[in-house]
Amino acid sequence: MIRNRFSRRTVLRGVGTGLALPFLEIMQSRPVLGAALQVAPPVRMACLFFANGAIMPEWKPTGEGRDFQFSKTLEPLAELRDDLLLFGGLTQHHARANGDGGGDHARNASAFLTGAQPRKTSGADISVGVSIDQAIAARIGNATRLPSIELGIDRGRNAGNCDSGYSCAYSSNISWKSPTTPCAKEVNPRAAFERLFGSPETAADLERRGRNRRSILDFVADDAGKLQKSLGATDRQKLDEYLTSVREIEQRVARAAQGPKEIPELQLPDGVPAELAEHMRLMFDILLLAFQTDCTRVATLMIADAGSNRSYPEVGVNDGHHELSHHQNDENKMARIAKIDRYLVEQFSYFLKKLKATQDGERSLLDNSMILYGSAIADGNRHSHDDLPVLIAGKGGGTIETGRYLVLPNETPMNNLFMAMAQRMGSPLEKLGDSTGVLEIG
């Protein structure tokens, strides 16, 4: 039933399902003693990880502060300049061996958001630390339908030896609920979508929906129609755009579920698109909807598992990414890696532009978010873990001074940045991993 008062928790109801709403103007204020009480949209946080480091001379901007110039790799972000805070000097010390020998890729992923040294084991006795996303989700997760969501592109695995004696759990996860419990990521767009927007249903309901190929929007149509009649013109347009976006993603997910017909030898799981760009963009769009509807405020996305050896024929790179990363300063190999680096930034730019185009109260959804993009390996050839390729997009609800390249003293703990992000999420921490303080980013 649609009521006269609306909150961020209002949903459209239908038989066996519910659909969260985006932030509408009608949710912004309500009369209190003759005045209007403004309800600011929440701040959201997403942490995106890419594998194998980067070609740092092509990544690092030149200049400093507001007078920086974009590098070749980051050039696709140029029109978002005022929405970015770029970093130099951040370090993840515990991604280093520190006496444990090889395994930099496993440590890259496991230390990325924890700032903790993973126990070197390929058995069940894994241990690293709590990641920043889960530390925040534990404190604010009860405000949303899902405390957090973990997405990925590579399925990976959580058992066996994946990197020089390190468990595959370290290479396949960046989100850790506890030192011994990774949060498994969802790589199937359909499953991710239904986790966010599908209410618990019986097996018969699921079978019926699949058989009839009905949209979730069909089930909430009556409620949506009643809501439309009670909204102003701006809200009606915003709701229409949102519902159109939901249906378009459903259609893309349904097409993906059919699987590739021309190359069945790939044996892709049901629901995972054959084309990498489409897979990534589906996950980006699902993440945008998750934030827009306030289903969750905390997310992670692994663009590739640590040590990924995927090739990128989309940009003419048919060699494996990991193999190329051991380039030994071969200019031809470095040029191919730089193509991969830029291609991934282009996909990231797609996500940021959609966030920026989505209104969220008086700001854009990007303005009200903090989107971390980076890796805990800098130079993949040397397996260096200092002066990392890291940036944040979004203003954190107006609390981050963007449009800068912030060059910090080398060996600045990356977890100091996480401490600052936690403050902006309304969940300040006393310490996380190897943090030594709170990084000033406002």
Image (tube, rainbow, N blue to C red):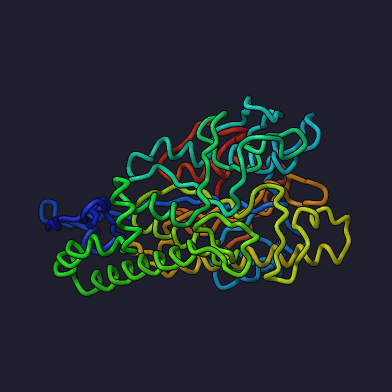
Q: Quadrant of residue 240?
A: bottom left
Picture coordinates of residue 76 (x, y %)?
Answer: 62, 71
| Residue farthest top in this picture | 125
Camera-side residue: 49 or 310? 310
- Image height of 139 relative to 259, above or below: above
Q: Is residue 147 left or right of residue 322?
A: left
Picture coordinates of residue 238 (x, y %)?
Answer: 29, 70
Please name the residue shown 21% across and 62% down the image. 26
Please name the residue shown 62% across and 27% down the image. 124
Picture coordinates of residue 318 (x, y %)?
Answer: 76, 65
Picture coordinates of residue 346 (x, y %)?
Answer: 61, 68
Camera-side residue: 204 or 74? 204
Q: How many marks?
A: 0
Q: Quadrant of residue 320?
A: bottom right
Q: Is residue 22 left or right of residue 161?
A: left
- Image height of 216 relative to 300, above or below: below
Please name the residue shown 62% across and 45% down the image. 156
Quadrant location of the N terminus in the rendered image: bottom left
Q: Is residue 442 left or right of residue 262?
A: left
